[in-house]
Each structure stands twice: as C-alpha cells, then as structure tokens.
Amino acid sequence: MSWLKGHEWLSYSKIAGGGLCKVCIIFGWREAGTNDVKLGKLVTEPLKTYKKAIETITHHENTKYQQANMVISQNFVMVMEGKSMDVVVQMRSQERKIIEENRKKLIPIIKTVILCGMQNIPLRGHRDDGDLESESSSGEGNFRALLKFRIDAGDEILLDHVNNCAKNASYISKSTQNDLIDSCGELITNKIVNKIKKSKYFTIIADETTDVSISEQLSICIRYFDVVTCEIQEDFLKFVEVVHLTGENIAQHILQALENLNLDITLCRGQAYDGGANMSGKIKGVQACVSNVEPLAFYTHCASHRLNLAISTACTVPSIRNAVGVISTVATFFRESAGRTHLLKEEMQAHLPKEKQNTLKKMCETRWVERHEAVLTFLDILPCLPVILQKMADKGDKRAATAFSLLHAITSSEFLVSLVILADILGITLPLSRSLQATEIDILSAMKLLDTTTASLQTKRETNTDAFKKLFNQVEGLANEIGTEITVRRVTNRQTNRPNIQTQSVEEYYRVSVYIPFLDYLLKEMSSRFPRTQLQRIGQLQKLLSHNFSDEDVDDVLQGAELYKGDLPCFLALKGELQIWQHMRENLPNSPAEAYKRAMALPNIRTLCQLLCTFPVTTSTAERSFSTLRRLKTYLRSRMTEDRLNGLALMQIHQDIASTMNAEEVLDIFSRKHKRKLSLSYM
C-alpha cells in the first residue's frame, strides 16, 4: 500500500489473533485526558481495517497531541544525530553567553585598575559615589575620570554597562576597587610563588620602616635562583603591619606570611636582615627564632649596612666629620633659596665647562653612594662657590653672616685637604657599594669584590707617603684656584680636642693627622664588620669555582657539602661528580650561576651552585620597596588599608608581570572572592 508510505509514524504491530495492524509509534500520551482530547484509533485501539484508513490517519495527524509529539520526536532525532543540542545544553549555552557578556562589561574596568596601579595613579577622589554618567564631576577620582575617558573614546561595551546596569551592580565602587586591586596582587603573587616553588630553595629578606601614618611596615622579599632563566631573582611579596617590634613577634609575622603563601620554611636556606638587636639577636632575635624552625636558614647581616657603618665610623675623624658637615650645610644653604640657586647656575655657566655644571646635592644620612656623588659634585663646583659667597657677604642682608661663615669654612686648609681625601677614598668604596646593591650579585662575587677593595685600601695605607703626595698636589692646585694657601693650625704645648702634631712640613702634618687615621679607621672597621668566620660555611663550597681545582679541594667541597647532604639528589655520587668537574678546568665559570649552566650532567654540583646563588648578600630589595611605599602611601592616602596597599605595591614594583597580566585571569580570581550580582564564573 504505497499511500501509507508517507506516514513514517505508522508501524505494524501484532494483534491477539496473530495478524498485523497499524499503530502510532510516537504517541507519548502528552495531552491525554486534557482539553477534551478523545483518544481513538491508532492510540487506544489499532487500525485493523483500511476501508476508511485515509480519513482516520488524516484526523490523527491533525490532533494537537500528534502535532506536539511530532515536534518532540523530530527534536529527539536531531539531538541523537548531533544536529541540535538538548534542552540542558541549550540552557547552559545561554547561561554561558550571559556570563561572557557580563565578563566583557568588567574587562575595561579591570584594565583601568591595572593602568592606575602600574602608573601609581591614585584611584579615589573626594566624591566617588553615584552614577558615572552624572553631570557633576567635582571631587571625582582618577578611576572614574578614566572610565569616562574610555566611554568618550568609543568604548561601547562600557557605555552599555553604565547605562543599563543596576545601581548595586555597577562594579565601580570603592569596595569593588579594593577587590580588583587585591585580585591583581594575588595573581602577581601566585606567579612569583610558582617560580619560587619551581626553584625549590629560597632566602628570606626582610626590613621594617615607618610609613606616613606612623605604622610600622615590614617588607618581606624572597631571593631565589630561577632554574628556567638561570638568573638570581629577588622579589618583593608583601608588606605586613607590625605593632610590637620584638624579635619573636616579627619572626611570627614572617613565618605566618610564608605559610599563607604556601612556601615551605624547611626549604629556606638563608635570612638577611639589618643588624638591629631585635633582628640579629642570637637568643630572641628574628634570625634565632627562624633558625629554631629551620637550622639551615643561616643569617647574614646586610653587607651594604655593614659597609655604611664602616665608612660612618671612619668619618668620625674630626677633620673628615667637619668636612662632611660643611658640605651638607652649604648644599642646604643654596638649595633652600631659588635666588641663591640661580646665582650659582650663572656663575657655573661663566666659569665651568658644561659637563661640570651640576646642582649641589644634599648629603644623604644613610646612603654613602649618594654621599660620594655629593662630595664629587661639591669638588667640581667648589671654584665657583667662594665668589658667590663673597658677593652675598658683601650685600649685608640677613644671610650675609651665614655666607661669610661658609666662605671661611670652605676656604680653610683643613676642609680642602679633607674634601680631596674623602673623594679619593670614597672613590674606592663606591664600586663595592653599588655592586652590593645589585640583585644579581652572589655571595662569592661579593666576597671577591670586598677583598679587592680592602686590598686597594691596604695598598694606600702601606704607600701612604707617595699616595698622599699626589693628593696634596691636587689640594694645592685647588687652593691656588680659589685664591687661598694651605697652612697648618697653631701648635700648642697641650691640646686634646684637635691634632697637635709638630712636623717639618704642611704635607706631613695633614698626612699624619687626617689621611692615615682615616685609612686606619676604615681598614679596622672593614675587618671587624666583615669577619671571615661568618663565611666559613661557604668557604669550602667556594672552591668549586677555583681554577686550580685539586684533590684537596675535592675533599674540602665534600666536607662543606656534608651540611646540605639532605638537599643533594645523591650525596654518595658527589665525589664522582667532583672528579669529573676537576677535569673541566678549561674555561671554568666565574660565578655560581654560570657554573650551574655548565654542570648539566652533574645534578649534585648543580644543586650546590643553586644554593650558592640563593645565599643572601644584602637587604637592598626590601629597602627599595620602601621607596615604593613612600610613593603610594602619601599624606592624602594615609588611611589606605593593608590589602589595597599590597595590591598597588605589587603592580608598581612588578611592572614586568603586571604589563603582561591577562584581565580574564584577574576576573577569575575576582569572581571567586564573593558572591556577585552578575554571573561571572563559568564554574
């Protein structure tokens, strides 16, 4: 019966008598018993006779339940054949589409927060509430102003969000700002921590300072050797507000911070702090408390601090101390007045070459790198200063007396000699001071540079007669240039407050009374503040980089590595690796980082080189974070919360990471922090 072939919903079925009949195979009783639907043939009873089959089939096709079931069956076939999605998938697809649209709305807001964080642009203003499209913009913050700028520049997605969002779902409030800043900081921290974990071993670097709100901030940084780039890294992690500055309390804050960051303290191999009693104390200091938890976390007193202390003590020689004071006073005298500064510039332009035309620099109280630059600048400008000060003294105004006294001070013989001596000696310590503040310096390189600097100073001490003769000739040339004469003070029978030495010449007087005491003080302080006993634990490991690596050196390295046998992949195999290393004498590396690259097939030696790179040298990274703190937490932003401060500090300090930060990643962290009005998370 070809006229029945067009109805695919019909099928034959066996009846009680053994014959066949037609039934509807897709009837699902969808509307049975509703809307006065009367069920008949093909549903409740089969079609046995075909006399009126066409009329019966046509009537069945026109019923509502048959039409609805036909649609359902067609959808079912399409889903099974993969041509369509089922209802659940369609609902999920619609939900995903809504989430994607919501996330697109927040991307411009997140990018604006990242921009403000990287460029240190304060986000909030005096009036940061209300609709973004309101006409009044008085007291509005930079964040809202930048969002308006994006809208004016044609950001249609942000414009649609601002116009159509609910009042409690605008995501531009101060609370949302805090969450987004915190999310950015968390993302940066996670990336740093992942690198630290991959490198395994690390060192704690910490230092504290007082911020503008008179709160004590502890800066926590981590030093590690990046095994991917084969470079030494020192990364700032966070600020922690500390109330009680006892060693035990600070140590507890450090250990808690490491635990929160999921860093294992048992992998800490060093500590670097300043020399304060609460940090360096052997019983209750921070280093003692951390060492009780991890004995291999050896403490290192910041080398830059020690060098500064050595120079500061050496500068207590009366003549040198007075010269430093005069330089600072003269710099302040000119810098506090625009008129005097202008006179100085005119005089320099008239008498000095262009490369020496600099402004006077203030003497930094703590950083001797800057003090040396101030001394050199003062020495270059000195020929112009007496002329200007004499003009000011002749005017007779209220500052004439000060100008006259400064003129007398800078033209005195003692000052000129001390100035030249300072410039010469600090010129030797300047490279050391700068190198110690570099992130990539390792402890072995620092030791070599320290030995070289000390040797240079010792050579000057041993040849002080010839060395000072050259300096004295320079002093005499300078004195002739400014129109004065080098003389000695009057010698008395008894004097306790200044040098009182009877000599045959002026040169001999200043050599004995100023030059030699200054050198002796400095050498003594360098020796006492950089004792070799503190470096004994790595002295044996240092021989890995010896160009004459002998059998005796092999035994010394084995003895030194005994302390770290738990860190080595196989301590028993170290001796064999050292014997192989002994035959690699040609082109041996000069630093542990280079040695790490060379020892590709020597895992134990690579581990030792990694540890040598991990050992701390200074706390310069923590001190550099203080500069960021002062830029962030200003007088107008003194009530900033700790989480907001850390997020902004991380974006400001780690701009290399923040610049590559994906807004989608920030949004993932932001969506998990709290339940949001808009659906933002795919999970």
Image: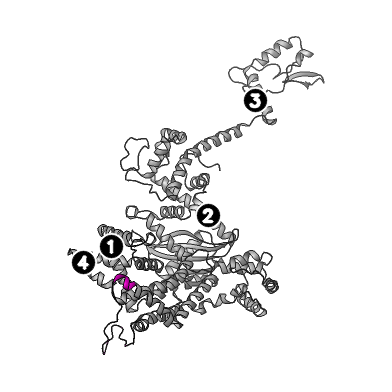
Residue 393 - label: 4
Magenta run includes residue 490: yes
Q: CA distance from mark 1 to mark 4?
A: 14 Å
Which amino acid lies under the numbered mark 3 shown in the image of this protein?
Ile
- Quadrant (top left, top right, bottom left, bottom right) of the C terminus: top right
Would you say the residues marked 1 and 4 are in contact, meaning their CB atoms lie under 8 Å apart?
no
Residue beneath disc 2: 190
Closer to viewer: mark 1 or mark 4 = 4
Which amino acid lies under the numbered mark 2 shown in the image of this protein?
Asn
Question: Which residue is painted at 35% across and 62% down in the image?
Answer: 352
Q: Earlier in the sequence, mark 2 or mark 1?
A: 2
Q: Is residue 512 above or below residue 137?
A: below
Mark 4, other Cα within 10 Å: few <14 / some 14–19 / many ≥20:
some
Residue beneath disc 1: 334
Closer to viewer: mark 4 or mark 2 = 4
Mark 3, other Cα within 10 Å: few <14 / some 14–19 / many ≥20:
some
What percent of the width, then of the height, locates residue 641?
Answer: 38, 54
Q: CA distance from mark 4 to mark 2?
A: 62 Å
Which amino acid lies under the numbered mark 4 shown in the image of this protein?
Ala
Magenta run includes residue 383: no
Residue 90 in sight from this viewpoint: yes
Q: Earlier in the sequence, mark 1 or mark 3?
A: 3
Residue beneath disc 3: 72
Q: Which residues are magenta?
A: 478-503
Report which quarter residue 583 is drawn in.
bottom right
Secondary element at tag 2: helix
Mark 2, other Cα within 10 Å: few <14 / some 14–19 / many ≥20:
some
Q: CA distance from mark 2 to mark 3?
A: 50 Å
Question: Which residue is painted at 31% across and 37% down in the image?
Answer: 136
As rendered, which of 157 and 47 lies closer to the eye? 157
Question: Which residue is painted at 58% across and 34% down in the image?
Answer: 93
